[in-house]
Image (cartoon, helix red, strand yellow):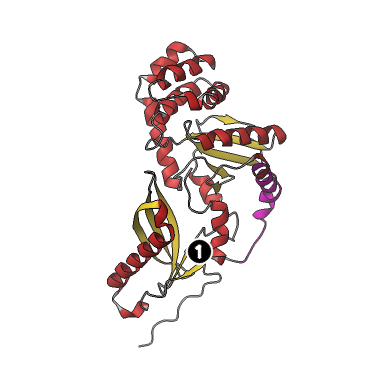
Amino acid sequence: MIYFVSRLQRSALIVVSVVAMATIPPASATPEASRDQVLRGHIVAFIQRAYGFRLDHVEVKTLGPADASGLRKAVLHLKTKDGQELDQDFYVTADGRKILQGEVNDLNGDPWRSNRLKLKLAGAPTDGPATAPVTIVEFSDLECPYCKQEATSLKQVMQDLPGQVRLVFKLYPLVRIHPWSMQAAVAATCVAEQGDSKFWAFEQSVFDHQEQLTPDTAPNRLHDFALESGVDAGRFEGCLHAPAAPAKVQASIREGDAIGVNSTPTLFINGREIASALDPATLKGLVQNEAKLAPEFDKLDTGLKGEQCGKCEPLPPPKP
C-alpha cells in the first residue's frame, strides 16, 4: 500500500492546504509554452522538497488547461525509493502561484457516479445480494499484507451488516514488488470460473498462508489451495495453461489503471475511492453512512447545471 496522503485526508486538503509558490513569475511574463515549462519546473521542485525523502523520480505527466473554477490539473508520475510507481493529481491556480493536493468532487448530484460507471462488475467474484444498498469494489493483490488485513475487515462488516453490502473482487497484482502475485492472480481467475464460493475459499487459504509462500513454493501451494476449494482439477489445470486467464488479469489491471488505482487495497464504496486498508469499525461506519445517505443525495439540487458555470449566459457579440 503506497500513498502520500490518504484519499480520505486529501478531500479535506484541497480546501485547507494551499501551498504558496511565490517564486513563479506572473502569468503574463512569458508566452504560454514557456510559462508552462517554468511552471512544470516549479511543481517538480516543490514535490521534491516536500516528498523527496520518499521519492527517486518526479515527472509532470500532464498539465491541463484551467477549468471553469480556474484550476489546472497536473498529473504527476512518481517513483518511490522502494521501486513503486504511481500517478497522483495536483491542482495549480490559473496564475501559477499556488498548488493544491486533493480531490475535486461534484456537488451537483452523486459525486461518485462517474467512478461507478467505469467499474465493470460482470464476471467478477461477488459476495452479498445484488440488492444491497452499498456495493464495495475491491482491487486487491493476494500477496499484499494490507489486502489480507482488509479481507478480515470486509468479512467482519459483512457479518455485522447482513444484506447491506455486496462485495466485488478485482485483481490488481503489484508485480514490481510482489513476485508471486501474478501466479496467484491467474490461479484465482481459474478458480473463480468454477464458482464464487470456491474463489472466496481460495482467497482465504492464500491469505492464511501468505507469509509462508515464496516464488518457488507458490505454484504447488496455489494448486493445493485451488483443489481444497472444491474445483474440478482437470478444468482448473486446463485454465492455468490457457491464455484466457492471464488476459483477464491484465484486463482487470487496465481497468484499475483507468480509474486511478495505483496501490492495494483500493476500495470503491458505491464509487467512492478509498486507497488504504480500513479497520472494521471505520469501514462499518462508512458503509452505514453510505447506506443511509446515498438514496437521498440525488434529491439535492444545487441549481448548478452544465459543467461548473451555473446559469450560463452567452457572451455578447464582439464590438465592431
Q: Residues within 10 Å of mark 1 (few under 14, many from 20)?
A: few
Residue 223 place in picture, x, y as percent: 45, 17
Task: Assign a secondary structure to mark 1.
Answer: loop
Above or below, 276 against 300 in this view is: above
The residue positioned farthest toward the front in the image shown: 53
Amino acid type, callout 1: Glu
What residue appears at the point 53 percent right and 27 percent down from the top-left corner? 207
Pick the front one: 212 or 28: 212
What residue appears at the point 48 percent right and 42 percent down from the top-left corner? 1
Q: State which quadrant residue 267 falls in.
A: top right
| Quarter of the picture holding the C terminus | bottom left
Above or below, 194 against 268 in this view is: above
Residue 130 place in picture, x, y as percent: 62, 34
What residue appears at the point 48 percent right and 12 percent down from the top-left corner? 232
What residue appears at the point 59 percent right and 60 percent down from the top-left corner? 108
Pick the front one: 195 or 201: 201
Residue 200 seen by the camera: yes
Residue 212 place in picture, x, y as percent: 48, 24
Residue 121 seen by the camera: no
Above or below, 248 against 99 in this view is: above
Which residue position holds label 1? 307
Q: Is residue 259 magenta?
A: no
Number of numbered callouts drawn: 1
Above or below, 99 against 318 in this view is: above
Q: Is residue 301 magenta?
A: yes
Pick the front one: 141 or 305: 141
Residue 131 place in picture, x, y as percent: 65, 36
Q: Main secondary structure of the magenta part?
A: helix
Which residue range is magenta in the image?
Answer: 283-303
Pick the front one: 142 or 316: 142
